[in-house]
């Protein structure tokens, strides 16, 4: 094999090795559960008066406490286990006395607290 | 590794081969048959990529004019049709004087060969190490470019860029076609790897260009040290790759490639052994590459025009005694079927088949004139030093000085390298002299390419005993000691920048959180909803538009705060008011006019202004991104 061919093959092999590595890394980076620690809370329907919500867990913690508040009054609460990579759906029934109030969903896991709310 | 991963990898490399190699390879085969040794195997390999980029552009333009959808199948068929045509042309050609002898210029000694491999390894290794920490799709420019490539993949039409002159078609065609063919998502390493390949090819192009200019293997190998290994991370190298500075990366391949072909065409002026027929072929390829450049990046094309004009003027002045002979040869060269045909095809495409959008807008006029901003008034020497690196600047100018001392006025290559450096230096430091109104730092970034060549020439010339010490005036020990000191200076200065490549990779959680919030909005909105997001505090926000694909300006964006205060560019204020003070009268008017009903912000910075408003609900929260819904 000529020198030039050797150089070309060397370049091709290096490029392929480099790109395979970068693809492998990007797959890991884009996986929400690999090497990351976060969770989210969201209403299942953002527009309606529906108060159902979802906890999406991509963190190492799996114990979550959720509290539903109407203004400052606690309406409902629960402790749930959500494993990494799993979602938890909570059903919160809408009642007429919630109307014109701010309904807040507080979710606590460890020392982290996140909340969402709807002004009904 | 899963089977799926391996399969997708194989498909990706086949796509690269089909889109970025095959058309250029067959074009070169038709122009220079295998038996002809005007270009070496390495050159054939390197230029196949650059030429392919241009060929696939032209095929896409033809499809666009003929209203043929640009799909994976039509792209492959276009490449096949072009390649088979070239192959038939190659087969029909009569090859005389078949000479398969290895080009002497590309035959390296054992030491040179291993040094070359080592430098290539280091180049790729350092860049890969840096990109390992930046490969996630987060960069703003990368997001913008990938939007257009994705639009092309989804609509199967060339994008029209909503009238914006800053995006140029050649930046997106190959990227989109590789995506269609390989199925690789834009949300992967694929765009970065595409740019890495182009970046590596630009370094190899400079290597062969240097080899042809100086006919010296050591200088050419050193050019890889100065362009590939040293300052491998800083702009316009790996940082531009990860940042998605598409136009510059592609331009830095196409401009030296065009220079290479013009250089080879010019050999007719110097050597009696060079055939007119071959020079015409090189000139045709140079013209073809120039059209490719104009279809790919306006700034590089603009710079190319200045350098090329300066080069021609300087060369003619230096050879004024020989003008009659030169013009005679140029006449024979230019007024020939291949050259005129290539030029005519290029012009027909440019004006009648597909005209780049920057030609139709006032982009050219805004680039010419008195500098309008402080950032366009030229760089200081300190700015240049930090842009190209102290080592490269010092050795580059030393190289320029030595080149002037050893000047061969008939050598087009010497004039090329000198004019390339000198014009970039003038354009970036004294733009008012030639009425340039462009950001000086962007022009300054281009200097690293010619300065790498000159640094290689400078370093080699100082310690080349034939040049410096032919009369044994300088003792060998002194020469060796000096070489060691300069080498340490070169390596420490140039490799210091690569330390960034080995820093710990950042936390990509905020990126994923932005994607998750975007997915939430995709599921919870429809075409009647209007979203506004913040660019200041949300990571990778320029990629949000790829989730919706409802226009480049969708979702609306609150830009950097300083942009709202720029007196030279008055702009709309609604995007600022609606997030910063949503209760204000201005914001209320804006909400009414724009019908904005979803706002995406970082709750750590923008939360309290919404909390007190009764018409806003916080419907999503992951800690770094929150979504507000306005009733």
Image (tube, coloured by chain):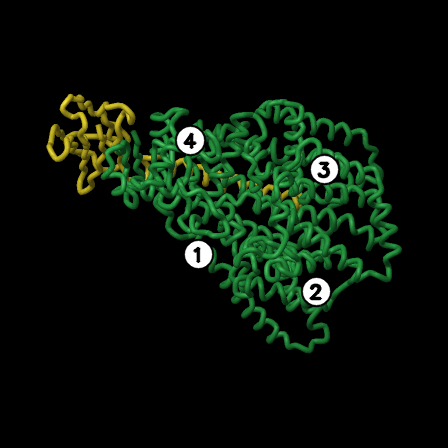
Chain colours: A yellow, B green
Give the position of the C terminus of chain B as an image quadrant.
Answer: top left
Q: Earlier in the sequence, mark 2 or mark 1?
A: 2
Disc 1 designates what residue?
Answer: B499
Identity of the residue drawn at 47% across and 57% down: B497
Disc 2 designates what residue?
Answer: B403
Disc 4 designates what residue?
Answer: B547
Residue at mark 4 to residue at mark 2: CA–CA distance:
53 Å
Q: Earlier in the sequence, mark 1 or mark 3?
A: 3
Disc 3 designates what residue?
Answer: B28
Q: Earlier in the sequence, mark 3 or mark 2?
A: 3
Numbered disc total: 4
Is the same chain shared between marks 1 and 3? yes
Residue at mark 3 to residue at mark 2: CA–CA distance:
32 Å
Residue B421: tell me if it is visible: yes
What crowding class fits label 3: few (fewer than 14 Cα within 10 Å), some (14-19), or many (20 or more)?
A: many
**Whether label 3 touches label 2, CB < 8 Å:** no
Is the same chain shared between marks 2 and 1? yes
Left or right of A38, for residue B261: right
Q: Chain of mark 4?
A: B
């Amino acid at each position: 094999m000529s020198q030039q061919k050797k150089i070309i093959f060397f370049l091709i092999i290096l490029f392929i090795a480099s790109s395979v590595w970068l693809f492998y890394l990007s797959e890991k980076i884009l996986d929400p559960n690999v090497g990351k620690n976060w969770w989210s809370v969201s209403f299942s329907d953002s527009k309606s008066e529906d108060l159902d919500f979802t906890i999406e867990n991509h963190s190492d913690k799996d114990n979550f406490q959720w509290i539903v508040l109407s203004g400052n009054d606690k309406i409902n609460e629960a402790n749930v286990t959500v494993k990494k990579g799993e979602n938890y759906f909570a059903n919160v029934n809408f009642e007429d006395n919630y109307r014109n109030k701010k309904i807040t969903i507080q979710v606590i896991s460890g020392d982290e607290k996140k909340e969402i709310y709807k002004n009904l | 590794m899963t089977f799926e991963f391996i399969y997708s990898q194989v498909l990706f490399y086949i796509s690269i081969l089909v889109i970025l190699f095959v058309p250029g390879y067959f074009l070169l085969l038709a122009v220079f048959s295998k038996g002809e040794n005007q270009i070496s195997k390495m050159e054939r390999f390197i230029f196949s990529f650059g030429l392919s980029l241009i060929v696939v552009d032209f095929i896409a333009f033809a499809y666009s004019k003929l209203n043929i959808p640009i799909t994976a199948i039509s792209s492959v068929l276009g490449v096949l049709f072009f390649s088979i045509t070239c192959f038939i042309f190659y087969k029909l050609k009569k090859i005389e004087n078949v000479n398969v002898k290895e080009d002497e210029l590309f035959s390296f000694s054992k030491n040179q060969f291993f040094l070359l491999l080592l430098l290539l390894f280091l180049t790729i290794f350092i860049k890969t190490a840096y990109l390992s920490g930046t490969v996630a799709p987060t960069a703003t420019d990368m997001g913008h470019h990938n939007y257009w490539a994705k639009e092309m993949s989804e609509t199967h039409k060339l994008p029209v860029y909503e009238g914006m002159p800053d995006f140029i078609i050649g930046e997106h065609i190959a990227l989109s076609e590789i995506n269609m063919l390989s199925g690789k998502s834009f949300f992967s390493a694929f765009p970065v790897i595409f740019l890495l390949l182009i970046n590596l090819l630009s370094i190899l192009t400079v290597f062969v260009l240097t080899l042809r200019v100086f006919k010296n293997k050591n200088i050419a190998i050193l050019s890889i040290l100065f362009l590939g290994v040293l300052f491998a991370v800083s702009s316009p190298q790996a940082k531009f790759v990860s940042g998605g500075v598409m136009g510059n990366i592609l331009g830095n391949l196409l401009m030296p490639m065009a220079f290479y072909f013009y250089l080879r065409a010019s050999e007719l002026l110097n050597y009696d052994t060079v055939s007119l027929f071959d020079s015409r072929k090189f000139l045709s390829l140079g013209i073809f590459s120039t059209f490719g450049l104009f279809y790919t990046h306006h700034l590089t094309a603009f710079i190319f025009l200045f350098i090329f004009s300066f080069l021609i003027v300087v060369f003619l002045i230096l050879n004024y005694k020989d003008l009659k002979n030169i013009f005679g040869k140029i006449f024979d060269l230019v007024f020939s079927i291949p050259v005129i045909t290539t030029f005519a095809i290029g012009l027909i495409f440019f004006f009648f088949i597909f005209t780049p959008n920057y030609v139709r807008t006032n982009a050219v006029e805004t680039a010419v004139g008195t500098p309008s901003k402080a950032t366009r008034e030229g760089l200081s020497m300190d700015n240049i030093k930090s842009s190209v690196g102290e080592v490269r600047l010092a050795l580059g100018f030393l190289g320029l000085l030595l080149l002037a001392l050893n000047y061969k006025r008939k050598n087009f290559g010497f004039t090329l390298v000198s004019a390339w450096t000198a014009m970039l230096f003038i354009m970036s430091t004294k733009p008012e002299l030639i009425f340039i109104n462009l950001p000086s730092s962007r022009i300054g970034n281009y200097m690293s390419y010619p300065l790498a060549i000159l640094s290689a020439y400078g370093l080699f010339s100082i310690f080349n005993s034939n040049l410096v010490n032919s009369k044994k005036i300088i003792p060998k020990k002194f020469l060796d000691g000096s070489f060691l000191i300069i080498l340490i200076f070169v390596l420490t200065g140039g490799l210091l920048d690569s330390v960034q490549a080995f820093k710990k990779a950042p936390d990509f959680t905020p990126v994923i959180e932005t994607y998750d919030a975007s997915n939430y909005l995709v599921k919870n909105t429809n075409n009647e909803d209007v979203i506004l997001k913040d660019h200041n505090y949300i990571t990778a926000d320029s990629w949000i538009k790829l989730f919706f694909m409802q226009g480049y300006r969708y979702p609306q964006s609150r830009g950097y705060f300083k942009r709202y205060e720029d007196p030279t560019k008055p702009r709309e204020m609604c995007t600022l008011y609606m997030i910063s003070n949503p209760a204000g009268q201005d914001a209320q008017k804006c909400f009414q006019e724009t019908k904005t009903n979803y706002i995406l912000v970082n709750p750590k910075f923008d939360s309290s202004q919404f909390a007190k408003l009764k018409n806003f609900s916080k419907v999503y929260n992951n800690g770094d991104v929150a979504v507000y819904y306005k009733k």
